[in-house]
Image (cartoon, rainbow, N blue to C red):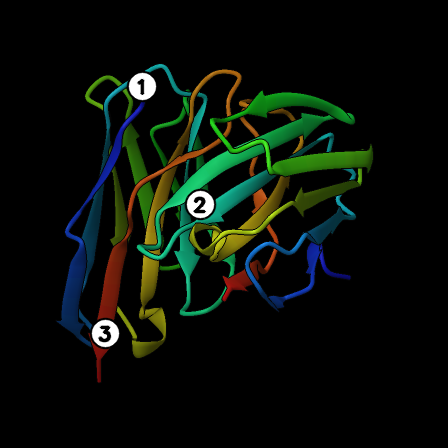
Amino acid sequence: DTAVSQTPKYLVTQMGNDKSIKCEQNLGHDTMYWYKQDSKKFLKIMFSYNNKELIINETVPNRFSPKSPDKAHLNLHINSLELGDSAVYFCASSQVVGGPNEQFFGPGTRLTVL
Amino acid sequence: KQEVTQIPAALSVPEGENLVLNCSFTDSAIYNLQWFRQDPGKGLTSLLLIQSSQREQTSGRLNASLDKSSGRSTLYIAASQPGDSATYLCAVAPPGYALNFGKGTSLLVTP
């Protein structure tokens, strides 16, 4: 009965490959997010979707493309992976973006690009 | 642009001590402030959520306060235990946006 789940948990791949990370939440929330935690452990927002609509798109390379097939799922596809993409990617969800509602995080996906 | 600062960056205390973690933010126009715990190699666990209209929240041995006008929050941990060792993250949600995180305080509680 995990609230926010991500797959895979670990992802090791070569430079130049394309990979996807999947996220699902069973909390009935309307808003989902992708955050990136870099090697210095700093967490930054990348994208946010509200009811399948992109509402936040930070300064992220075009190689990153989020997709939300429904409000319970938010996937992240990364093209032409680079060494600098190595990080932990966290998915989160909340009831209303920026509202007084709590954000719940998934366990993270540790991406290593060789 | 919202900047969130956490002091200290690292803290080591003996078991049983009460301790305070500090968080400051530059823009007081926030909707809420959330404290998280992150264990090494793990995800984020939400500890406390304080809405902008509230002054504090309590959960067990944890108490978080919020002074929006001065841009400050504190997380008070009473009677610390070795199991409290983790990184504690403060994050604020500005209107219509996602969370802005501080860089965290790494806490070590020694037996």
Q: Quadrant of the C terminus of chain B?
A: bottom left
Please state which amino acid type lies under the numbered disc 2: Leu
Residue B48 image label: 2
Q: Nearer the viewer, mark 1 or mark 3?
A: 1
- Depth check: give the residue in front, A21 or B15: A21
Most distant residue in the front direction: A16
Q: Earlier in the sequence, mark 2 or mark 1?
A: 1
Secondary structure beneath dot 3 equals strand
Task: Give the residue number, with chain letter if any, for mark 1.
Answer: B1
**Residue at the location (48% across, 46% down)?**
A36
The CA span between labels 2 and 1 is: 24 Å
Whole-percent x and y of residue A48? 61, 30
Residue B10: x %, y % from top left: 17, 60
The picture places residue B94, in percent across and down from the top left corner, at 43, 21
Q: On screen, B84 above or below A59?
A: below
Q: Are marks 2 and 1 on the same chain?
A: yes
Residue B45 visible in the snapshot: no
Tag 3: amino acid: Val
Is B65 or A101 nearer to us in this picture? A101
Q: Secondary structure at mark 2?
A: strand
Q: Chain of mark 2?
A: B
Q: Which residue is mark 3?
A: B109
Q: In this image, A29 relative to A80: left or right?
A: right
Whole-Å distance between the Cαs marked 1 and 3?
34 Å
Query: Disc 3 is attached to a residue of which chain?
Result: B
Q: Give left or right: position of B38 versus A4.
A: left
